[in-house]
Image (cartoon, coloured by chain):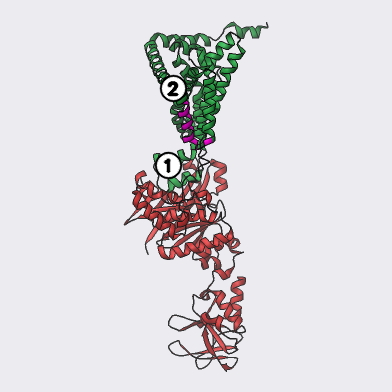
Amino acid sequence: MTVAVDFRNVDIVFGADQAGSLKMIDAGASRAEILEKTGNVLGCAGASLTVNEGEISVLMGLSGSGKSTLLRAVNRLNVVSRGQVLVKDGDKTVDVVTCDEATLRRLRQKQVAMVFQQFGLLPWRTVEENVGLGLELAGVPEQERKERVQRQLKLVNLDQWSKKYAHELSGGMQQRVGLARAFATEAPILLMDEPFSALDPLIRTKLQDELLQLQAELKKTIIFVSHDLEEALKIGSHITIMEGGRIVQTGAPEDIVLRPANDYVRDFIANVNPLSVLTAWNVMRDRRDLEHGKDGWVWLDRRKTTRFKIDDHGLVAAAERDGKPAVWVSCADVEGQSEEAAQVFWANPGTSLKTVMLAMHRSQTAPVALFDDQSRFVGAIGIRDVLSAVLRR
Amino acid sequence: MDPISKFFVSYKIPIGEWGKAFFTFLTDNFNTFFRGLSGGLNFLLDGVVDSLLLVPPVLLIALIALLAYYLQRSRGLAVAVFFGLLFILNQNLWKQTVETLVLVVAAAAASMAIGVPLGIWAAHKPKVYRVMLPVLDLMQTLPTFVYLIPVLTLFGLGNAPGLIVTIIFVIPTAVRLTHLGVVSVPKSIVEAGEAFGATKSQLLWKVELPSALPTIMAGLTQCIMLSLSMVVFAALIGAGGLGTEINRALGSRKIDLGLEAGLAIVVLAIVLDRMTRIAVGGKK
């Protein structure tokens, strides 16, 4: 995997007394202490984070946690006091902190595009003139610019609106213009600073879906700032949680939900619906932890209602439910199945917990079996596993 | 008088003397320069006035009405301008009006040409603005008569000193409104420009100035109105035009002449104001 953006021990301090503040950061002082002593505001401290190409890395935190500050270091809208921000620039890597003005401008025009919370559209320009801004600044000839702009407008379904002024559009449409403007430069790295926070919930969800669809096609590297954990869990391939300017935890979405690093993160996830992140893999009991009977039979649940007979290759040879032979059916078909007692559903590790629960519901709380890609039995989920995952106990 | 107060009046700080010495120094050493400048400006202004007076008044009035239509796309305005100016012609004040018009337009144009760059500079450098501010206050509040005298000694009588006096009075407005316009460009769109790699000059021309344009144009309208308010003073030092008529009416207590010239100024003011009101907001 190629690294697209690499933050290395980034400290950002706003104010005159940089040296004094950095010394206090080294001593582990908090933001409040630094403010009181030096009058400077700590933006972020000791932030190290690697963002790989093609992933959506979400920076999370309450307002003032330093998430936007860190994001804006990538295109030097915020000046880094100490540390490195390495950005992939074609075949080489550029340290944004130390590069010269010309290099920075080229990065901003061609490598790193940005989407803003307040859209940042120029109100006296039409939609197409706004989308073409980055290309215009980079000196792309008008003909080529027009073609590229039209292409982007089609991509975000705004080609009907190209001659309208930005203020004539709804908030959701304005942010689509913002997206199109960022895509138009064809920069591989996209910075999104709470892009959907100013929108109402329905539009927000819709734009999140659109972003994910576009991302599946375009495969950008996206650094996304959000204060909404549901949003982060939905779109992030990695989530970084920040507090008071420092990174508290970085990990995959389910890592954050299942293994919060401290109380701050725990508070954060307290109101998150675990069904939106957890998969069968996160809650299953491994086959080695299940209770084994004679002749290769394995009990799937603690109540011993259901058992599988596993052959030497790890495949299922027979199934029994409540002492009677049973058939095993995929969770994927759960909607179409009639309710029969002698069914055992199976799932893949990536199946969402929600689907697993639906299968349990359909089969009178029978356990759900998990198979890997080669149809080998890997584990099972009983009703108690689901309950403890949902209740986080 | 009590002794303490007496102490304070015992020595008068010779501000007036210093100022006089400064202007004597200027007239003694740079007389040719100032007279040359004055002569050049007079020649230019008179030339424009004379050539405009060569055009038959009704034709010129029609052309101005056409310009009004071109600027504002309003037929009603064009008609109003046409009849307003015809009224002035009817009052037999056409020559004076053209003189005033040329002076006002020249003063406003010069003020914008100097004031807008200064305003942009001040907006980008807060320190510059802090230094500039008291000077601007001085230029706006110092009673006009006070600087009529030195301007008169430096430039002599005529249109040129009238123009200079008007510019001094009007520039602060151009600077202030430009400064206001550029300073109040929303931070989000400046950042958008920066984030997409704008150079300093691209940022100025493609983001800051278009965003500040309505305020700057309001500044232009203000400059024209303030220039008009100066015509009576400018006339005191020899600038011709409607101001001269008003001064003459004042001197000879002619109510009728004063009223006629006064109304002509009002009509001119309304015409210029409506013509230069920027249509930015109305652009659909």
Residue A312 coordinates in the image, percent (x, y): 44, 90
Q: Secondary structure at mark 1?
A: helix
Quadrant containing the C terminus of chain A is bottom right
Residue B29 higher or lower than B229, as above or below: above
Letter of the chain that mark 2 sits on in the rendering: B
Letter of the chain in red: A
- Amino acid residing under circle 1: Lys
Question: Residue tagged by mark 2?
Answer: B56
Q: Residue furthest right?
A: B2
Determine if marks 2 and 1 fall on one subunit: yes
- Amino acid residing under circle 2: Pro
Residue A193 coordinates in the image, percent (x, y): 50, 53
Asked whether B62 falls inside the magenta stretch, the response is: yes
Of tags 2 and 1, the one toward the viewer is 2
Q: Residue at x 46, y 59 (%)?
A: A156
Q: Residue at x 58, y 78 (%)?
A: A358
Asked whether B97 falls inside the magenta stretch, the response is: no
Letter of the chain in green: B
Quadrant containing the N terminus of chain A is bottom left
Q: Secondary structure at mark 2?
A: loop
In magenta, the rendered stretch is B60-75
Quarter residue A261 falls in: bottom right
Question: Residue tagged by mark 1?
Answer: B206
Residue A243 coordinates in the image, percent (x, y): 55, 55
Find residue A227 and name its label.
none
Between B24 and A289, the residue placed more toward the observer is B24
Judged left or right of residue B255, residue B153 is left
Main SS class of the magenta portion in the image: helix
Letter of the chain that mark 1 sits on in the rendering: B
Is residue A33 at all visible to an observer of this figure?
yes
Residue A183 higher or lower than B106, as above or below: below
Count of numbered labels shown in the rendering: 2
